[in-house]
Image: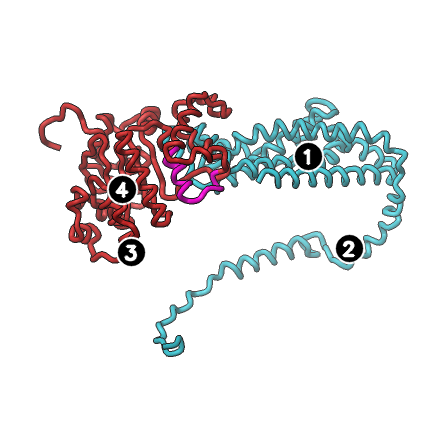
Amino acid sequence: MTAATAPRSARPSRPPRSLVGPLALLVFAAITWWAASEEYGLNFDVPRLFSNLTRGAGILAEFWPPDFSVLPRTVAPLLETIQMAVIASVIGCAVALPVAFLASRVTSPNTLAYLLDRGILSVVRALPDVLYALIFVAALSIGPLPGILALILFNISVVAKLLSETVDGVDHGPIEAARATGANRLLTVRWAVLPQVLPNYVAYSLYAFELNVRASAVLGIVGAGGIGNLINETRRFFQYDKLMVVVLEILILVIIIEWVSIWLRRKLV
Amino acid sequence: MAGPPLLIPPMIRFENASVTYPGGVQALKNVTLEIPDGQMMVIVGLSGAGKSTLIRAINGLVPLSDGDVTIDGVSVRHAKPKQLREIRSRIGMIFQTFNLVNRTTVLNNVLMGRLHDAGTMRSLLAWYKPEDVEIAMQALERVGIVEKAYVRASNLSGGQQQRVGIARALAQQPKIILADEPVASLDPPTSHVVMRDLQRINRELNMTTIINLHFLDLAKVYGERIIGMRAGELVYDGTGAEADENVFRDIYGRSLTADDMLGEAAAAG
């Protein structure tokens, strides 16, 4: 008749609770304590952080008002920053495409190529871009070239990693269909896989470009070209009001790039 | 198999073919079968009976673990990669879930059927010869949706998507068509439209057509010959007319229910 009178079937008994979750949480808490503790770590405490912050207020005040007289001098290095980012993004993302396909089990021709490619990628990713810039500056001399090389390596590792993970998740149906037509592996990737990941690839490339513009602020400090040189110079002479102008410029540039990439991505999907 | 050697080998020949999957599941057990040129053959059986494996053994998408499958006397099992692609190029395949690349156009999906012949460089750059585009257009014409050529595949209905799948197979200009549950994702009226398309292609182009179906009434209407499979073994081989309820009950190993029938306009063949 109604649900209330329906015979009640036996309920399954609750499986034993797994201890993995609480244990992981405990380990996590221990590591955090270790990093911040007085005896073993950095003796970090939050109230002191705030009291120290106010001490820096005097220096922070020197950033304001910005001294716009420096503006003409920023134009050339800012353009150099953008140009470095463009070149590094185009080359880095182009190389990242085949590297990404080799780094996914779905598209890699064999285990050897897969492992080799993944291995090289993790070695390249192990060092941060500033360290690469330092090495290239030492090897090549000061200027945008070592910066571009460092950014290319960075872009290959970032875009190839993100894209290979996207390739891992594509729909296998079209791949089977392409294989069934007798298409070779390269064309199967081109026509069954690439169309599926193309919007992601474009999004990752734009993201890499954005990161490159930001990174060149740091790269310049080690002599690898771009707006960072100017940051370093103004900072060394305590011209914080001029540094503020550069900071504002980078902020605006990155926001504009983000707007453009959001618009582009929306067009593509 | 013993017996007098045939002067002209039948197009598709299974010789004691077995498939054991890496998990130890034996999906095909010692199947011996001949399928002559131009036949429209339907394979019936429950899910997991080995229908899909049987079909995929023909174009080598599933490797045999024992025995052999030959096509025009050429072994699929012992074919080198290039030879295997050559064999596959002459076999069109249609899938239950259509396996289209949703993000690209109908025409690009159908042109996948030309990849084996269009040249790797040209195909990589989507710089197809006009002849190949014309073959793709004719294939679309044959299934009645040539006007959708430049529409994104994802914008089509299920029935239309399956016709794109058929057109992709036809664009290969194959001698054999394999269809793995081609109507299982479609509603009953659309199922008949697609089955009639396949029947028409079989008759007009004289392509050997092998179709997996689980609806028995559809199998009876469209199958010139019916093969029954149970637990990886061939348990029935006869004409559609001979296959009555007792035969199907035997193949399924249980009594039949309404779920085994598509119903609706079953006699529409």
**How dense is the environment of label 3, judged by Cα within 10 Å: few (below 14), some, or many (20 and up)?**
few
Q: Is residue A131 left or right of residue A236?
A: left
Q: Is residue B215 left or right of residue A87?
A: left
CB under 8 Å between callouts 2 and 3? no
Q: Secondary structure at mark 4?
A: strand
* Amino acid type, label 2: Leu
Foreground mark, 2 or 3, reads: 3
Q: Colour of chain A?
A: cyan
Q: Name the disc covering residue B259, or none.
A: 3
Cα–Cα span, label 3 and label 1? 60 Å
* Amino acid type, label 1: Asn
- Give coordinates of residue B251: x percent, y percent: 19, 50
Cα–Cα span, label 2 and label 4? 65 Å
The residue wearing badge 4 is: B20
Which chain, by letter, is red? B
Extent of the magenta region: B153-167
